[in-house]
Image (spheres, grey):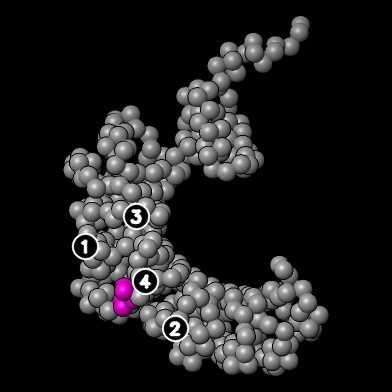
Amino acid sequence: MAAASPTSCPLYASGVFPPDVTLAVVELLNHSITGGATLQYTQMYSLGLVSRFWLAATRPYCFQVMELSDDNAVSFVDLVASPHCTLSYCSTTLFIRDTGLKSTDWLTEALTLPNTAFSFVKELSFAVSGDWAPVSSTVMENLPLVFSGVVDLVPPTSINDEVTPENLVSFVSSFPALQRLQLYSYYQYGSDPSSVSDPAPFRHARNYQPPPYLRDIYYSSSSDPFVGEGILSWLSSSAQPSLLESFYVYSYGARCLPLENTLRVSAGSLLRVTMAVSQVILQALSSHVDWAAFAELQYLDLHFSPATPDDMQALIRILTSLRDLPHLHWLSLQDVGSDPARLDAVFNEPSFSVLEELTIITKPKDHESILPICRGRGFLSFRSTGYY
């Protein structure tokens, strides 16, 4: 008897496959699509239309990222309010478009729903664009009540008549489950960054305590460090002991006192630190931060381009302070210059006893001078990678 073709099988013809097969196909397709997020979502939406079984498998991928604006905010709340809504199975990043959300009608409706209705929203991000229109203070006050399950937050970057420093601090402190805070400092196109360069107003917001589960901070400073520095000032001056575990810093501007204070008050809890900073900032960090106090530090990634002997000396001071840390297993240095003798003097000491991997990323012309530093030092792994 001839074998039945796949199309003759009622289950396969209706698009029903074993769950493990369906999930494997969706996962494979998700990782194989190239051409950007738009194409990826289009393909997933098409696959979800095969049948309700495929819809259930593709739903987490289709709703990974959603955008909220005045055009769709009411419809979004209506969708969540529907008894047939299945977004609770997803873990969603919600972008608040800065060009809208002046209307608060959707918030009025959202606040009538159970607190768990929006628990699927795990990341809340205020998207920045050139046509800036600030979110209203009413939206700022009520968003934490609606999205109480958010663990990853990118707050607004504008301080104006609608959003004051106190509004912003209150906003950040009102997310009870917040674990990761991402701070991006931008300035409104056409404005003068020097007119808002003083973060002092944030230091007076001590009535607000940081979220109790906040563990990670990502700080990126561009032309106007006002918002980012202000939030750091508030966090570092809080009466609540710091429990930060990860600190990612990208700042190529002038000296940043709140950055130094945050490192100092978090020295006892930080496990991972990544810093890409200017020469001015690194020199200040080498002189005003006690790196030997980072007793729990396990990973340090330092991006730095020394331009003068003083810059190189700042790097040596930091490395010298790290030599006896009991848990420092991974150390990565990028753009450290081509002065191997100075680095060799640090790593040739009977220290760094627990270091497992040292990564030095240099220009190709510096490879030959840098490579001998780690030979014979007993490190389990060493890589030297040139990227230009």
- Circle 4 — which element? helix
Numbered range of the magenta stretch: 195-199
Residue 363: image quadrant is bottom right
Distance, label 3 to label 4, CA atoms, is: 15 Å
* Left or right, residue 21 beside residue 154: right
Residue occupying image coordinates x 67% and y 16% = 6
Disc number placed over residue 161 in the picture, else none: 1
Q: Residue at x 61, y 33 (%)?
A: 25
Residue 255 is marked as: 2
Q: Assess disc 2: are there few (<14), some (14-19) or many (≥20) residues with their C-alpha within 10 Å of its C-alpha.
A: some
Amino acid type of the residue that numbered disc 2 sits on in the rendered structure: Arg
**Count of numbered badges drawn on the protein:** 4
292 vs 316, left or right, is left
Which mark sits nearer the N-terminus, 3 or 2? 3
Q: Which residue is mark 3?
A: 132
- Is residue 223 found inside the magenta-colored segment of the image? no
